[in-house]
């Protein structure tokens, strides 16, 4: 993964919510930590052009989010905090199939990809379920399966474990460890972040620390708890 932030600043409603972020992301597992409102969601929304910076540039494998948004979106799989923002069709398999249509014309191949992704996240039995009958945790896993089915090159997770109970959270952690793609993970789940190679700590729109997980978490606990 090579993502570059070049002196990136973002303003919302006249307030500065991200300030002069300048860094290169090359590691396989990168965590983002910070108090509520510190700019974490803003930071990751910049990655696939959901948000454009007022100043500076965000480059994903050399592609500028201002100019190449559709190419970038086909590379990045974004798993939102709230799965309801992501699931649009009433039946699980239909929803996954819908996303895959952009990639694959053959319905049998699409069905295979959907089945594999549901198996990968441990919920193959949910394929024909009505989405509104799923629990919050099941919905989060289905949304993840829909993203994995697309076989993106890079994964971005916004608070992936918030709706998961301990068993599903542990399963997610193991799954994340085994995924071949590089991943950027925003989370308040400190144990999950300990498995990262690098953790960025945000506060008031600034990257105040960029360190190994143990150091970043210790700093966060001391200064932001
Ligand atoms: N569309 C918007 N209009 C105005 N202000 C916004 C908008 N989106 C975000 N903000 C503000 O930007 C700041 C950073 O928000 P952001 O969602 O990036 O924080 P966060 O670290 O992800 O927070 P949380 O942990 O609570 O999800 C907050 O003060 C928020 O109110």
Image: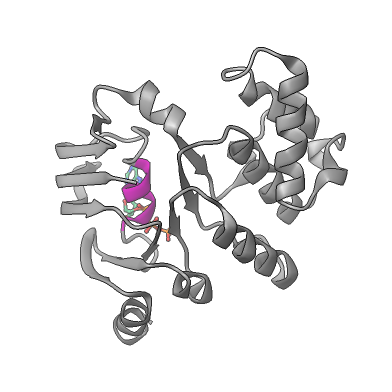
Side of 173 relative to 185 (left or right):
right
Q: Is residue 222 above or below residue 174?
A: below
The image quarter in which residue 176 lies = bottom right
**Looking at the picture, does residue 222 appear above or below residue 143?**
below
Left-right relation of 51 to 62: right
* Secondary structure predominantly adopted by residues drawn in magenta: helix
Residue 44 colored magenta? Answer: yes
- Residue segment shown in magenta: 39-45
Nearest the eye: 169 or 87: 169
What residue is drawn where x is 70% and y is 72%? Answer: 166
Residue depicted at 43% across the width and 67% down the height:
196
Quadrant in which residue 27 is drawn: bottom left
Above or below residue 148? Residue 32 is below
Q: Exactly how many numbered labels are in the figure?
A: 0
Q: Position of residue 57 (x, y in %)?
A: 17, 37
Residue 66 spot, x, y in % from top left: 24, 26
In the image, 150 versus 16, the foreground residue is 150
> Does residue 60 appear to the left or right of 174 in the view shown?
left
The percent position of residue 147, horizontal first and vertical second, equals 59, 38
Q: Position of residue 75 (x, y in %)?
A: 43, 32
In reply to whether residue 192 is colored magenta, the answer given is no
Q: Quadrant of the C terminus?
A: bottom left
Name the colouring of the figure.
Answer: one colour
């Amino acid at each position: 993964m090579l993502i570059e932030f070049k002196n990136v600043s973002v303003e919302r409603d006249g307030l500065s919510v991200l300030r002069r972020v300048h860094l290169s992301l090359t590691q396989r597992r990168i965590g983002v930590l910070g108090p509520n409102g510190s700019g974490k969601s803003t930071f990751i929304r910049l990655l696939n052009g959901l948000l454009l910076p007022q100043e500076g540039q965000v480059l994903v494998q050399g592609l500028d989010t201002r100019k190449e948004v559709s190419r970038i979106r086909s590379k990045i799989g974004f798993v939102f905090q709230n799965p309801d923002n992501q699931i649009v069709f009433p039946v699980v398999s239909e929803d996954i199939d819908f996303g895959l249509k952009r990639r694959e014309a053959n319905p049998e191949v699409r069905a295979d990809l959907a089945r594999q992704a549901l198996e990968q996240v441990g919920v193959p039995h949910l394929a024909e379920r009505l989405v509104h009958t799923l629990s919050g945790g099941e919905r989060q896993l289905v949304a993840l399966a829909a993203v994995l089915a697309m076989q993106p090159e890079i994964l971005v997770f916004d608070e992936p474990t918030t709706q998961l109970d301990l068993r599903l959270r542990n399963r997610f952690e193991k799954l994340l460890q085994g995924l071949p793609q590089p991943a950027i993970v925003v989370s308040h789940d400190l144990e999950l972040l300990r498995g990262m190679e690098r953790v960025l700590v945000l506060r008031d729109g600034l990257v105040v620390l960029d360190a190994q997980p143990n150091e970043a978490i210790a700093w966060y606990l001391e200064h932001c708890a």
